[in-house]
Amino acid sequence: MPVFFTRNIDTAAGRAAIEGEDARHLSLSLRVRPGEALTVSDGEGTAYDGVIAAVGRERVEVSIREGYPSLGEPSVRLTLFQALCKGEKFETIVQKAVELGVSEIVPVLTERCVSRPDEKSFARKRERYERIALAAAGQCGRGRIPSVGPLRRLEEVGGTLDGALFFYERAVRPLHSVPVDGRKELSLIVGAEGGFSPEEAAFIEAAGALPVSLGGRILRCETAPIAALAALLYAVGDF
């Protein structure tokens, strides 16, 4: 059973309530019954084991025990600056990055991005990305709901890249040579289908990011961030 997120938690009364779409999913699709175990989370890192007390189409009530830090959260806060990819590729990145433990995804518009939506169009896409993030967080037992930010141009995020790991196909420094053990926060920036232009690479390096390589193979844009996140989590001891 996945974790269900809700703000409707009364710790003093030992009760929680799940409403709306999640309640309909529990009652109509999963067909839960009173007495079944269910874990809920406040979305801020605290989980509660509970027992279903009442089931309705629009509201499921849960008797909860004392909360505890969610076991689904990694020990390091991960921020992914991801150049926007076309089609379903970005959706795949959002889903898998959340499953792995990313805290924040910042979509970035770069020179070689094939997908170039206007502000209104991306706002609609962002709503879908946030729904994907929420579903992935619940499915894999996260304690927090990762955020998917608004689309930003590369020059707008330059001030936040100091110390970030810059995954670049022309980099020569292997990831395993970068000491990350003990870090509490890590940022990484990954390109879209065409990677980064030489001018963009120079800008990212000048902003303080460290160019690193994932090996001699050039990975697809939807593969690279997942491989990078998995490697980083292993390096900090979360795998």
Image: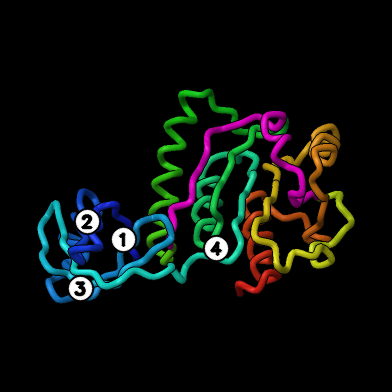
Amino acid, disc 1: Phe
Point out the tag, 1 or 4, that comes first from the N-terminus: 1
Which quarter of the rendered picture does the C terminus lie within? Answer: bottom right
Q: Is residue 147 magenta?
A: yes
Foreground mark, 1 or 4, reads 1
How many angstroms separate mark 2 from mark 4 (CA)? Answer: 25 Å
Tag 2–tag 1 contact (CB < 8 Å)? yes
- The residue at which mark 1 appears reads as 4
Looking at the rendering, the stretch of residues picked out in magenta corresponds to 143-168
| Left or right: 184, with 72 as reference point | right
Residue identified by numbered label 4: 100
Q: What amino acid type is highlighted by mark number 2?
A: Ile
Give the residue type that dot 4 points to: Leu
Write down the residue under mark 3: 51
Q: Nearer the viewer, residue 216 or 57?
A: 57
**Few, some or many residues within 10 Å of mark 3 (<14, 14–19, 20+):** many
In the image, residue 179 lies at what x, y percent? 80, 65
Which mark is first along the chain, 1 or 2? Answer: 1
Q: Which mark is residue 18?
A: 2
| Residue at disc 3, secondary structure | strand
